[in-house]
Amino acid sequence: MNRYQDVIIAGFGGQGVMLIGTLLAYAAMEDGQNVTYMPVYGVEMRGGTANCTVVVSTEDIGSPIIHHPRSLIAMNRPSLEKFQPRVVDQGVVVINSSLVEMELAQKERLKTFAVAANEIADALGNTKMANMVALGAYVQLTQIVPLEAVKQSLKKVISPHYAKMIPANEKALQAGADSVGP
Amino acid sequence: MTQNKAVYSLPSVLADVPMHYCPGCQHGLAHRLVAECLEELGVAEKAICIGSIGCSVFIYNYLLVDTVEAPHGRAPAVATGVKRARPDNVVFTYQGDGDLASIGLAEILHCANRGERVTIVFVNNTVYGMTGGQMAPTTLLGQRTTTCPEGRCKEHEGQAIKMCEIVAGLGGTAYAARVALDTVKNVKQAKKAVHKAFEVQLEKKGLGFVEILSTCPTNWKMTPVQANKRISEEMIPYFPLGVFKDVTSAEDKG
Amino acid sequence: MPGKPKRILVKGNEAICRGAVAAGCQCYFGYPITPQNDIPEYLSKVMPKLGRVFVQAESEIAAANMLLGAAACGVRAMTSSSSPGISLKQEAISYMAGSQLPAVIVNMSRGGPGLGDIGPSQGDYYQAVKGGGHGDYRQLVLAPGTVQEAYDLVIKAFDLAFAYRNPVMVLGDAIIAQMMEPVAVREVEAPPASEDLGWNLMGKGSRPPRVLKSLYLEDSALAGHNALLREKYASMEKEVLYESFMVNDAELIVVAFGSIGRIAKSTVRGLREKGHKVGLLRPITLFPFPSAVLGALAEQRKLFLTIEHNLGQMVDDVRLAVRKHADSFFYGHLPGNLPTPDDFEQPILQVMGVAR
């Protein structure tokens, strides 16, 4: 049975959307699946918008670029506004409700989930881990890869210089997962 | 009883064939100086020559060493690739003024600035020879060529570029000298300079550079004798002879 | 995972570097230009540690000529750039083809013409395949469609360069350069020892001197040289590589290379799910071109649609390949727009509809 999932992860530059995209891709590889990660940067070196597309499949992957994704992680309002209309019907959308009003969510057409990523990360002591909270929630909702594989991959994508941050990031991933369900 | 003593023989590095150069051209003499130095230093067997574009394009017919042909002006870049790939070989370029000082200016300057352990033999005869006597970057003010028929004009074409001084000013250059081939004394000096430009390479001091002022009777529209005279009367006053840099000399050490 | 080769998650640019290192590349000469900057950056870290050569040249022109010099010595050497920089390298590539020097050139192409943009494009197909520099020459052109292929093909490029004593280009684009995928990597090979290959420059020692050149002025010498080159180019035919996907029962075959080939594969899959008999032929070698396989498919009275990320270049070669029995339609996605599988669906259906 072939399994296929794709996701656009989008936010401000600096919110760490590329990092969680890479982390998800790494976890999928460690899980033995095929995966592509495609970054799209703004022209700015710093402070612009950023998004990436991750495709995970048990089959070989065709396009690494997806116009109508099956899921979306929107870390800020411009990202939701840009990508939500393109998500396929009944697609999974994780919305960072700390920065985006949930009235904007297309609740009838899509499976939308509010995750107060910044608040949850704040409670853990570091707003910067909002990205991990959002990814934890997304992984829990889609079961795209085991959450454990994501945690195990942290050491591969976080530079050794920040190795001491890994336990905190694991907690953030778990907190995100817990926030959306069992 | 008279004993015969050989005072002249062909360096083994130099092919015993007629050269294609015009009567009175000094490329042949410059080739011979390079050949003698390679032989005296005992490095002909491991020498790699980078040929260039211009009258000396057939240098491989005369200098019997491994040779690769470089595109116009690019010999110092090719030499960089050769030397980096084969640091134990002795690598040199042989370039004219159009090749080195015009189209290849970026390549020679950066090669010297990196201090590549190569030797550059630069023959300056103030004109593009092979293509028919057009204006070169080293053409003197007032000199007539096929592309400055009224004489080189400072306002329109700028002045002749002094490569030896420029190359001497770069950090990676170990030795830079300007010599001429118009008199026996100058030929002897030229030989010493070529020798030295190879020595600094062998000693891994940096880049060795020799600018050789040379004749082009055909494109100067002169007899060989007139052309030879022009070197001392017109060229040397503008392009002074001498050693412009020598990191091995006492004053440079100080 | 036990029993499987080690997999790493890397960008296409890094895969190129790792492939080159694994292939025993001794010298790399580069110059910054987006979107291939990861290549000189990575190799500036790795090559010196391995005792190999990294030089940031003063220009793409100089880098290509340094490559020429190292190639003349018979060592494995590479340069990389992106479209505008590749234009500057054409002079040296022509000389290397003429002088029969083995070298690897990577083009992570970007949008054009001129400065264009830093996004993907296939605008350099003609330049790569038809001899981008002056004179009449060919280079082998390998077009990876995945990051794994980028790794494998750069290794193959070195082997082909030396087998044919010819420049080989690896033609990717900003998509292949920037995307990450798992890559199964192999052991790093030490560069082959400095050996006498019978033609390379090492200093003459006790043998007659060697000359590597492209100038042939004597009567009919150039014609003789070109006859040899023509024979060599023809012999490259056996190196043809391509991927064919669901072509057997297909009514229409999409022909697309590189990243566009893999994006089109998603379109083909989607249309198959809807019951449309569509297949894909993805040339992996662009020179030599898989003309024979296309010709054989044309004999089966199939329709062809060439899809490229340019105004139409490879379509010429497809038309030549199928000309006895068919023609090829064309859809050109414009450089400056990022292509997705959805973009190709209507053009395919239109051709199938037109034909019916």
Image (tube, helix red, strand yellow):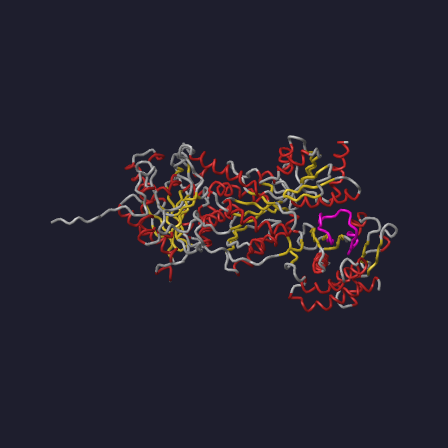
Left-right relation of C166 to C264: left
C331 or A102: nearer the viewer: C331
Instruction: Residue C246: tell me if it is visible.
Output: yes
Percent x, y of residue C98: 48, 40
Residue A74 falls within the magenta-colored stretch: yes
Please, is residue C223 above or below residue B201 in the view?
above
Q: What segment carries the magenta color?
A: A54-79
Residue farthest toward the left in the current orientation of the protein: B1
Instruction: Residue B140: tell me if it is visible.
Output: no
A18 or C209: nearer the viewer: C209
Percent x, y of residue C188: 56, 58
Please identify the quadrant where the C terminus of chain B is shown.
bottom left
The quadrant holding residue C42 is bottom right
The quadrant holding residue C328 is top right
Please, is residue C180 above or below residue C214 in the view?
below
Residue A66 falls within the magenta-colored stretch: yes
Residue found 40% across the figure and 37% down from its top: B128
